[in-house]
Image (tube, rainbow, N blue to C red):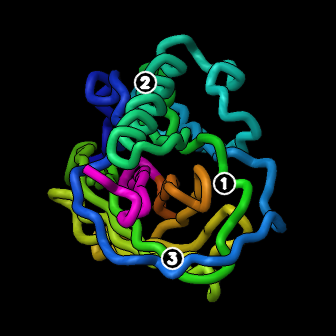
Amino acid sequence: MKITFTRSLLATAVMVGLTACGSGGGNGMNNNTTSQVTGKTGAMYTVSLTNDNKIGTVTKTPLNNSDINSLNLDSASTQRINEAMNKISEEFKSKTGLDVVTGAAIVSNGEKFHIIYNGNPTETMPVQGSIHYKGSAVLGGWSADAPLSIEKGTSQFDVNFADSTLTGTLNVPNFSLVSISASVSGNSFSGRATSPDAPDGAVVEGKFYGKDALGLSGMLKTNTFTDNFGGAGIFSAIDETKITQ
């Protein structure tokens, strides 16, 4: 049995929002640098669907502008992505009192769907200390025996800026725990996600956003991505020590 995409299930944006969480201890962050940051603001996968709702082409586009309107997507997708971005940024500000523009979304217009993260990247990155981030995640997956399922859960990450490493987990109902390991370069990170649900693993990437790497957002896509099996996800999280309510 091959997967058929239910267009109605993808008709609205699936958004990542910050979950309620308490503040933690200090992060030991002291020194910063402006070196190695890039002009890229995010990235997007675009997956086209065939007339019989099968996987078509999969393309990846680097984003160089935090203005979603500049992507020239259809109006419905643009609106839904903007709604997701605004929702996440507003939640981050309500929790911390600080401004950070970032977010991630999975949206579809029925003919293709977009997996995206974007925002205003951190310009001055920490080079010492560590930060524990907490937030939310969305995972979507399918197999030859199961239809597309999209669920929302939680995310948490530990970033060691001195070692340029990021580790984290995505805990989403009806999916096995996803473990993430990535390398940090400038204000970006890239690496691999593993889960019993995806034996071939997944590629992960993202960026840091806001002052002093206040938040992060990113996306993942399984290495196997066909009608018979595939999965993707998005996540956003914020420095736990900056949460005031």
The image position of residue 82, as x and y in percent, is: 50, 24
Instruction: Name the foreground residue: 120 vs 58.
Output: 120
Q: Which residues are magenta?
A: 226-245
User: Going from the N terminus, do you reach mark 1 or mark 2 first?
Assistant: 2
Q: Secondary structure at mark 1?
A: loop
Residue positioned 40% across, 59% down in the render: 242
Residue positioned 39% across, 54% down in the render: 231
Instruction: For marks 3 and 1, give the CA distance.
Output: 15 Å
* Mark nearer the viewer, 1 or 2: 1
Classify residue 117 as left or right of residue 163: left
Dot 1 amino acid type: Thr
Q: Is residue 121 above or below residue 6?
A: below
Q: Which residue was labeled with disc 2?
A: 83
Q: Is residue 54 above or below residue 191?
A: above
Residue 159, labelled with which disc? 3
Find out whether the residues at labels 3 and 2 contact each other: C-beta distance under 8 Å: no
**In this view, which residue lies farthest toward the top?**
75
Instruction: For marks 3 and 2, give the CA distance.
Output: 28 Å
Q: Which residue was labeled with disc 1?
A: 122
Q: Is residue 197 visible?
A: yes
The image position of residue 232, as x and y in percent, is: 42, 52
Find out whether the residues at labels 3 and 1 contact each other: C-beta distance under 8 Å: no
